[in-house]
Image (cartoon, helix red, strand yellow):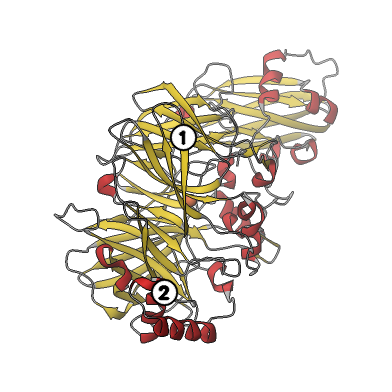
Amino acid sequence: MIPSRRSFLLGAAALGSTVVTPDVAEAARLISAQEAVTSDWGLVTRDVERDLAPHRLTRIHGRAPAGLEGALYRNGPAKFRRPGGSAEHWFDGDGLIRRFGVADGQATLSARFADTPKRRQEAEMDAMVVPGFGSPGDPRARIGSNDDANAANTSVLRVGDDLWALWEGGSPMAMDPDTLETRGFVTLRDDLKSMPFLAHPRVERDGRIWNLGMNGTQAIVWRLAADGALEDARVVRLPRASYVHDFTATARHLVIVLQPWVQVRQTMPFSSGFEWQAGTGTRVLVLDKDDLAVRREFELPDFGFFHLGEAWEEADGTIRFDVCATDDMRFAAAGASKILNGVPVGGEPARLALAALRPDGSAQLERTAFIAEFPRSDPRRAGLARRYSLHTSGEHADRPFASAVGLYDWSTGRDAQYDFGPDQVVEEMVVVPKPGRSGETDAWLVGPTINLREQATELHVLDMARLADGPVASWRSHTAVPAGFHGIWAG
Amino acid sequence: MKTRIALMAAVAALATATLTPDAHAQDASVKVEFELGRSTGSVMLVLFASEADYNTNRPVRNAVIPADATTVSVTFEGLEPGSYAIKSFHDINGNGDMDTNPFGMPIEPYAFSNNALGNMGPASWSEARFTVEGDTVQTLILR
Ligand SMILES: [Fe+2]
């Protein structure tokens, strides 16, 4: 499907007037309307019954670029339903860790579930009983600690000889990066056993890892060496108990964004304890990495979010970061439950915005019109000034999942896009620098899609400098793996 | 999510418990065996003889067992036959407390009789209750 004329047209249509003549755009629109898959979203959140043995993917387009060798590791929930009871929210399925290998021009895929106490207990009972972000749980659940509810289903981190599967409410789960065999929960220090470790660590250019773990108005700040050794951990107080799924960092600061979605009670499901406090603003706490006691606070207008981009500091001290901002957190509270039941959300998707925190204490949010989620950027510029934000796009009220990938240029306000078409669900893409090159777009973009028509997962490589041209290489599996959340590239 | 386990009550029970003389010594006994992940510190346990006492942490017996092996045990003799329940933890660092992480979660292994696990809280009496009759054995996993 990828190299077909149709997908080319659809991709071109997304670029709007820049390269497309009106008749071509109209043709694309008509084809799109005729062939659009009628919301067969079931595949996106389907249940995977067993681990997926390593297998070669079939090349369907182009060829792997020379110099692209490594693995894309991704994580996402892939088991939601059992005869005795089912998860009620997309975020509460069991984590399936996927490894897309690229070597010698060929691509492979394997996937294994994190072998968590949650999964063991639920397999034994043949019922999903453990409470979570949006699932109330079942009285039969046996939960002695937060890690008994750990779904290990959100993201991955490469640390030393391990691959960590991350879930924001508990410990990292160590996996074998080659076999994906589960090694066990990571305790970074005995007295910090079971402390939460967000699924969105920030990795500095030299490999040092910063992360948070949340508990209402408390956060633990983790600092790890590149090999995973704990360098420091301390608890900081926050001005309010906002939902924090992600934070960001400049080279010198941690930036903790406190949205007006605030925890007002401890209850299950976890998300039902939060309240949207309209009009109270989104507050931003900035901590010095060198001395966490040095803090500044800023205030932005109300917005909700799951994901932030990397932050940077400019010469005059202004801190900027991108954010995929929503008007509220309706999706979080309810939408992702509906997705699990195959019903489109009907809410407003997140749009790309840029926050500026000024040295004088003022702050602004510059919103764009571009629909955006899963923001990523050049890892060579982590914490430093940059020009581009990579993101997924194409969601709308009747379509809860992305169909396109976009690259927003903050210097021109233009968003280069490639749309895979209505029958493809586009997942997060990662930026993989080209060896020996340093330009911000000297990189490949690597990520999967789910081809709903072919009922198969595909892997794509795009050239970041020519994103709108679409994939330079695509492969297809014999099976569809449900949509994942976040991934990393390990070269 | 933040699961909170209210186990501090068990610790409080240990702190205030005193050995009670056997006013009505009987023939029944319970041997409590512990399987440990580490052999340091000590195992602390309290035995309750009724639901009310279990819920209000008024033990009928207690014990502190040196954790000098990965399997240790204690036997409570002279019990009246009937229903009992146990709360226990492995005080790995030997400081006399059930230590918690900075967010209040236990970091030392704990167990209730029957190896009952609660649902984000202590196991209930009905889950932890067992019958002592003649010579009874409970094997609890603390790791
Ligand atoms: Fe995320």
Name the residue tied to disc 2: A420
Q: Is residue A308 visible?
A: yes
Where is residue A371 drawn, in percent x and y? Answer: 48, 60
Looking at the picture, tell me which residue is in the foreground, A65 or A251. A251
Instruction: Give the structural element (helix, strand or loop) at label 2.
Output: loop
Where is residue A271 drawn, in percent x and y? Answer: 65, 46
Looking at the picture, tell me which residue is in the foreground, A133 or B48. A133
Name the residue tied to disc 1: A363
> Which amino acid type is marked by label 1?
Ala
CA neighbours of label 2 inside 10 A, class few (<14), some (14 to 19), many (20+):
many
Instruction: Give the structural element (helix, strand or loop) at label 1.
Output: strand
Query: What chain does mark 2 sit on?
Result: A
- Residue A371, relative to residue B120: is it above or below? below
Q: Is residue B119 visible?
A: no
> Which amino acid type is marked by label 2?
Phe
Callout 2 touching callout 1 (CB < 8 Å)? no
- Residue A22, relative to residue B59: is it above or below? below
Calculate the distance from the C-alpha at mark 2 to the C-alpha at mark 1: 36 Å
Mark 2 or 1, nearer chain start: 1
Residue A44 located left or right of residue A129? left
Q: How many marks?
A: 2
Quarter of the image containing the N terminus of chain B? top right
- Residue A392, relative to residue A380: is it above or below? below
Splitting the image into 4 quarters, where does residue B14 fall? top right
Look at 44% across and 83% down and name the residue there.
Answer: A28
Query: What chain does mark 1 sit on?
Result: A
Splitting the image into 4 quarters, where does residue A436 fall? bottom left
Look at 40% across and 72% down and name the residue there.
Answer: A16
Residue A56 located left or right of residue A128? left
Look at the numbered disc 2 and say if its residue's Cβ is closer than 8 Å to ligand 1: no
Q: Nearer the viewer, mark 2 or mark 1?
A: 1
